[in-house]
Structures are given as structure tokens and as C-alpha cells.
Image (cartoon, rainbow, N blue to C red):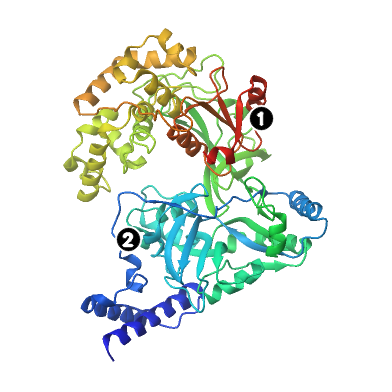
Amino acid sequence: MDARRRHAELVRIVEEANYRYYVLDQPTLSDAEYDECFRELGRLEAEHPELVTPDSPTQRVGAQPVKELPSYTRRVRMLSIENCVAIEEFRDWVQALKDFLKRDPGPFFVEPKLDGTGLELIYRGGHLETAATRGDGTTGEDVTAQAKTIRSIPMKLRGEPPALLSVRGEAYISKKDFEAINATLKGERIYANPRNLAAGSLRMLDPRITAQRRLDFFAHSFGEIEGAEIGSQHEFHGRMGGWGLKGCPGAKRCAAPEEVEKVYADLLARRHDLPFEIDGMVVKVDDFRVQRELGFRARSPRWAVAWKFPPTQQTTRLNEIQVQVGRTGTVTPVAILEPVPIAGVTVSRATLHNEDEIERLGVKAGDKVLVERAGDVIPKVVKVVEDGGGKRFRMPASCPSCGTALVREEGAVSSRCPNARCPAQVEQGIRHFASRRAMDIEGLGEKLVAQLVAKGMARDPADLYALRAEDLAELERMAEKSAGNLIAQIEASRRRPLHRFLNALGIRNVGERLAEILAERFGTLDALMEAPEEEMLSVEEIGPEVAKSIREYFARPDVRDMIERLRAAGVEPQPFERRTGGPLAGEVVVFTGTLTQLTRDAAKARAQALGAVVGSSITKKTTLVVAGEKAGSKLKKAAELGIRVLTEEEFLSL
């Protein structure tokens, strides 16, 4: 058999095995047989490079790392879907469809709502051309090389595929693989949930790392299709299998709303038994003609709704109330719980916020409490369900970390440790200094920072720039390579923009937004350090309390010493740069309400890129308001002052 024929046969065998294993879950080859075929294919392509094609199985992990992900602008926007939680809300949605159509909308199609990350695959002539993240719906990131590492995504469609198909779905990680990946970290910082791990893995600059993360993919809809006539959602779901794409298991056509409600109840009862995380189900009008008749609202299709599961709650015993110290000295009480599984995660701690919240709940050590993961993420004590007879909680008089007497200022809801050298504050401060939105020093995790502080190697952020790789390599869980990588990260952080440096310092009452305002107004670190309170008060959004905290911070001898040591180490914050031209040049923009297509941070960044100044409250200087859903008092005030208002859609069109 000649090389070309053997190559074609091996490609067919390997891709068929991938399809049977990853899509149908019906393997036909043993692991040893599959590996032998794959190795032979690799040897053949090495001997005959002219046989290598872009969709050869060997090219799934063939791309080199890149410095950044290129953007991808799609022709048909990926819209968000309206949510409902209560059964009454679902019934209201159905009734709204009937009112709009003046008749019954017909059957529905339901799919489990995977808790993954949105991904679009563009096939042209049956070949995978591009893969892109959802992004803001119109513009995402090109992750083609990363998507090719996902075995359930075919490089070439089977059968007689459409001439053009942009298929949309969810990239995700199974519960089993998520736990296995976290287990390999062996006490290092682990991932919070499969969704975050999937999203981060898909956006890895090195596809080889993505390949190690065991991502999977379910398709659920399409953006564009040419060369195939399809009349309904359930027909499209059936056709996908013939093209080699995996549809979401459990998807079902329901003749009436009552059947949809039964599917929801069954899915809610079985959610923790499924091999992947879900947070509800998506309900769509099945017939595409009826979908077109129903059309779209400003931000979502009228014919679909995401019926979310209610927040998951469990009862457990509260064993103890501890206190933890934050980077600014704020002392927060934390509930130490009898470990309990909630929404697939074992919860053993929950914040109690402050003394007033404990008083409101009436919670004590020994009580049986109801715990909720709000949004299936943040553990929260909801209420006491059984009095355990314990003693009422009292905030300690001194800091649990350094022993300094705690203070609670008039009008404050929390107690504070005033000792700036408190080890707990130092640890939290260094972690904040190195965080992504500050100096962005990757690799400085909680355990490593704790070691640096405990061993006296880091008293404040300036000490980071005196660290040597050989010193780090002696620490627990720090090999020579990881030590070298961390030193490189520290070196790269020496010239961050001024606003990120100011945010990194962790000045009380100064967050990202105020750091940008200060950087833009004063231009240099020296100018800000020497500015009197009166000058700060002339800056919009800075009041007496903020001005006082900034002035007091830079007046501290330890802060002055740290900044001098940072400078001596070559840390040079770069002046804040703002675009002076653009469609919004000269505008002062305020966002209000819930944005559905952008995060608030992304919207702010986009407005600044268009030349605008972004404010947090409406003042006499505000010239434009962008209003999302459920906009409240700010929208009303804008109307009273005659300020121009744009919808989110109108803002995005800029």
C-alpha cells in the first residue's frame, strides 16, 4: 500500500475512533490499538511531510504558544438569554408568548444548561476553520488552536455537512476531571469550579496546556448555516450527530409547558448525579418559523429562556466563629462549619461579614444553620434553624494575628487592627500587590506569601524585588524552575502603569476606579504624594474621608521607606494614558443598571478606549449615561438633568 493511501486510512481509523469514544461513548479500539495507529500516522507524516493536512489528527496539538489571543468578529451576534427561577416566572414567559402570537407557540425544546464557557466553531466546506469565545457577543477571541485539542470537536465534519456552519455550544470540564486536576495541585491554589477552569484553559496561550485539561464540548445551536434546510431545534439536534458533533445529553422535545415543568423537576433532582455541572435548563420554542415570528428583544431572543435552579441550600452545624484580618486591617468573622456538600462543592467556611450581621442572625457556635451558595459560588449563612445553646459571640479585643488592640471607629460596621506591620495585613497586602489587576505577578499564591512573611523574606511589597531564585528554591514546594519563573514575573512588573501601581499599594478607600482618577489627575507618583488634601478635594469623586486616608497613607514613614526601596529596585510606575480622540472624546460617562452583554469592567474599558472619562455617580459634569436593565435612581436623575441616555445596544454600536 502506498504512503498516501495508508495515510488516508490511518486518518479515517483515528478520527472514527475519536468519534466513537468522545461523541458516542462507544469505543471500538483499545487504548493500545489507538496509540499504535496514532504513532504510525505520526511516523508516516514525518517521512512524508507533504501528506500533513490542517485537519490531520496529529495537528490537534501542533500549534506553538502565542503572546496574545487575536480577536474574532462574528457576523451573527451571540445573544444572552433571559433568566427565570420560579415556576411562576416560567409560566409568565409562556403566557407572554401566547399573548404575542395570539395563539399557542407549539412544542418546546429543552436542554440542560451546562455551566461551562461559550464557544463557537465555524466550519467551511466541512473543515474546522475558526473557533472563537463568546466575548461581548460580537467580538470574541480566536482560540482555534486551543479548540483543536478538544477531542470531541471534529476537525472535519462527517457525512454531508452544510457548506457553512457556525455551531455554538459550551466547552466544559467534567466533575471527575475537575477533581483530578485539582488533586494534582497537591495543596497549591486550586480552581474554584469547573466553569472557571474551563474558561481559563480555553484561553491558554499555549495549546499544549489546554490539551492537558481534558476539555469537552456540547453543541446546542447555530449562528449561520448554508446548504442545509432545517425547520426546528430538535431537527438540528438530530442532524448534529450525523455531522460528528455532540449534542447536549438529556435534550428533549416537549409537547406542552406541563411537560417542560416535569423535565425541570427531574433535572433538579438529578443535577448532582450528572457527570458535569449544570445550573438550570434552557427552554426554546422548537419551530424555527415560530422563532422568527417571535423575534428578539433588545438583548435576547423572545423565544428562549434560561430556567435557572434556585440557590442550593443545606443545613449543617456551625462549630466555631473565627475572625480573619484583611489587608487594610478590617477584621471579619467567619463561620467554621461542619463540612457539607452544596451544589457539588464541600463547604466548610462561610463569611458572617461583621458584628452587626451576627447580631441580626442571632448565630452562635453550636447552632444548626441554613447555608446557601449564592449563585452556586459564595457560601453564606442564611439563618439559624436550631439553637445549639452556645454563648453569644463577642468580637475579640485584640488582633488574632499580632495582638494589637482593635478599634471600631464611629459609624463603622467593622473593627480594625491599626497595626500596619500586622503579619496578616502584610500577607494580604502582598497578595493584593501581586494580583492581576494590580502589579500582575503570577505565581505569588497564598501559601508562598505566607512562607515569605513567616521567614522574614518579605516585610512589604518592596522586599519582593530583592528576592533571588536560589532563596526561593529553598522554600517548600518551590523547585528551581518555578523559582526562576517567579523572579521573571517580578522583573516584568517593574514598569506597570501608575494607576495599577496605586491600586497595588492598597491605600484605604482607594480601589481601581479612584486609582485611575488619581493617576490621570496628578500624572506622577511624586505629585500625588506631595498633594495637600485641599488639592485632592478639588478632584471629582474624592471626598474628605478619601482625601484624608490618602494623605495619612503617604505621610507614614514606613510607606515612604517602602516607596524609596521600590524605586531603588527599579520599580517605575508609568504615566496614565488616556485616548484623546474617538467617538466619546470629551464625554463623562456613567453606567447604570444591569449590563447583559458586557461586564461593567469591560464596558468601562471600552468607553475609555473611545476617549471618555468614566464616572461612578451623576454630577454636573456628567454628559452621557448608559442604561442597562433595571436602571434606577441614576436614570431618573439623568432625565431630570437632561443628560443624554444610551441603551447598551446603542453604546455598543459606537
Give the amino acid type for the residue marked by disc 2 in the picture: Arg
Q: Position of residue 507 (x, y in %)?
A: 40, 23
Q: Residues within 10 Å of mark 2 (few under 14, many from 20)?
A: some
Q: Name the one closer to the observer, 623 or 474.
A: 623
The residue at 18%/40% (across/down) is: 471
Q: Position of residue 578 (x, y in %)?
A: 38, 29
Q: Secondary structure at mark 1?
A: loop
Q: Secondary structure at mark 2?
A: helix
The residue at 59%/68% (across/down) is: 249
Q: Residues within 10 Å of mark 1 (few under 14, many from 20)?
A: few
Is residue 104 toward the left or the right of residue 225 in the image? right
C-alpha distance separating marks 2 and 1: 47 Å
The residue at 25%/19% (across/down) is: 561
Give the amino acid type for the residue marked by disc 1 in the picture: Gly
Q: Is residue 4 above or below residue 531?
A: below
Q: How many marks?
A: 2
> Which corner quadrant holds the N terminus?
bottom left
The residue at 41%/56% (across/down) is: 202
Q: Quadrant of residue 442?
A: top left
Q: Earlier in the sequence, mark 2 or mark 1?
A: 2
Question: Is residue 256 among the parts visible in the rendering?
Answer: yes
Q: Position of residue 176 (x, y in %)?
A: 47, 63
Q: Identify the disc placed on residue 545.
A: none
Q: Position of residue 17 (x, y in %)?
A: 42, 79
Q: Name the one closer to the observer, 60 or 74.
A: 74
Residue annotated with mark 2: 208
Residue annotated with mark 1: 632
